[in-house]
Image (tube, helix red, strand yellow):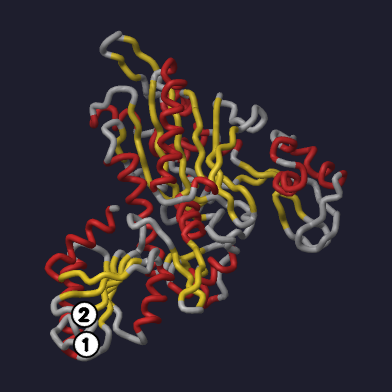
Amino acid sequence: MSATSLDQIVSLCKQRGFIFPGSEIYGGLANTWDYGPVGVELKNNVKKFWWDFWVTNRDDVVGVDAAILMNPRVWEASGHVSNFADPLVDCKACKKRHRGDKLLEEKLGVEEVAGIALADVTPRLIKEKIKCPDCGKVDWAEAKQFNLMFKTSQGVTEDSEREIYMRPETAQGIFVNFKNVLNSARKRLPFGIAQIGKAFRNEITPGNFTFRTREFEQMEVEYFCAEKDWKKIYPELEKASWEFFEKLGIDPKNLRWRQHDDAELSHYSALTKDIEYKFPWGWGELQGLAYRSNYDLKQHEKFSGESLEYLDTETNEKFVPHCIEPSFGCDRTVLTALLDAYHEDEVNGEKRVVMKFAPAIAPIKVAVLPLSRKEQLTKKSREIYDMLRAEFRCEYDETQSIGKRYRRQDEIGTPLCVTVDFGTIGEDDGQSKKDHVTLRERDSLKQEAVPIKKLLEVVKKKLSA
């Protein structure tokens, strides 16, 4: 990634149809974003890449797609009803609300603030003379805990008995289906259950584009094992997690592991590490890898009254499995792919913006571009386009100069462009052969003449390289 500012990415995303501000014609809604025609292709490709990596290409992981709305008792069992809250503080001067712990972390560091008591947040803000980011005053009200779950009502009337929640994480949908999956998929430990889905958290967000939003998508695996095996399996999942981002095309120089210290760890976890990415504003969490013991399954046993034990048929031993959770933010992964792909170079004295996506996640794989709008040329181009789009996500473009069309494809990250010129249709221009097209590579700018009858084979080879 070149020295890319967030403003550059936000501007490109809107201009080229990756991501738009949510509800924009009504003035927007804070930190909501809509994926445009190119963006939804990119996001779907990231999700498919993740699913293929963690599920399709493994024999020990299966998938589920659990409901967003769940029985409220699920969230009592998981601890979200009583414990899922942020320490928020109001500025008395401007009335704006902020997360007190995050303000302290920005000045003092995560380790210094981890585990701070609610009653100590405001005194510490005042002691450290931490100013309100909006008005610059040091005039803080007493910190209060605010539950982060979105509430809604089930049925046609609104009352407390019908109160349910939008799920704040996807993991619990896996835990409550553990026995169903175990019985139907006939898996033996160790094995994982994967899910991609939406989650919702009513938290104050920092405004770093799609890094943290109230509505977001998670990609998670809960990998179940016997307690004695977790220390052996954790490094294997650690290695796979890093490999996923490398294969996604992320530069390893922009990634690092950070292990949580004791004060940061959840009470049920003996080890948690994050893969962090070097965002324009600094290092930020991209993926978590947490050993969760058997806390979640035990809690759901307790609250539901149902046994979630596993029977080891070799030893005849019954026990509640432990689990390790690789948890990925889908929107953060897409943002990371955008940031890491962004490059600027110079072609013929002009600046070129190019998104160097890995071919597997590029929104458009091939663009077909007739040199002019002459009928014979566009007819042949359409034939070639129809041939290619049966195999790949393609785009056809015949408007403006060929140079501008190349630039458009560079800016949405299309790996290959196929140019159909007059030589292709037998009108010799002295530069190309009949029944040949020019294949242009996005990154190297290399151009080569390829026979139409071999085009599909050549494109497949280049996209899989």
Residue 344: where, in percent of width, then height? 51, 68
Residue at 27% x, 53% y: name it: 464
Residue 453: where, in percent of width, then height? 12, 68
Whether residue 244 is situated above or below residue 26 in the rendered picture: above
The total number of labels drawn is: 2
Q: Count residues near mark 1 (Cα–Cα under 10 Å), then give few for <14, some for 14-19, many for 20+.
A: few
Q: Circle 1 sits in a helix, a strand or a loop, which is it?
A: loop
- Residue tagged by mark 1? 429
Whether residue 114 is situated above or below residue 141 in the rendered picture: above
**In the image, what residue type sits under mark 1?**
Asp
Residue at 36% x, 61% y: name it: 362
Q: Circle 2 sits in a helix, a strand or a loop, which is it?
A: loop
Q: Count residues near mark 2 (Cα–Cα under 10 Å), then give few for <14, some for 14-19, many for 20+.
A: many
Q: Do the numbered discs 1 and 2 sit on residues whose CB atoms are within 8 Å?
A: yes
Residue 118: where, in percent of width, then height? 74, 38
Seen from the viewer's position, the closer of residues 353 and 191 is 353
User: Which quarter of the figure has residue 323?
Assistant: top left
Residue 451 located left or right of residue 270: left
Residue 191 located left or right of residue 83: left
- Residue tagged by mark 2? 432
**In the image, what residue type sits under mark 2?**
Ser
The disc placed on residue 442 is: none
Q: Estimate the spatial distance between the alpha carbons at disc 1 and disc 2, rounded to whole Å.
A: 7 Å
User: Which quarter of the figure has residue 65?
Assistant: top left
User: Which quarter of the figure has residue 389?
Assistant: bottom left
Residue at 26% x, 77% y: name it: 419
Residue 445: where, in percent of width, then height? 37, 69
Residue 380 located left or right of residue 103: left
Is there any visible trace of residue 153 in the rendered image? no
Whether residue 199 is situated above or below residue 364 in the rendered picture: above
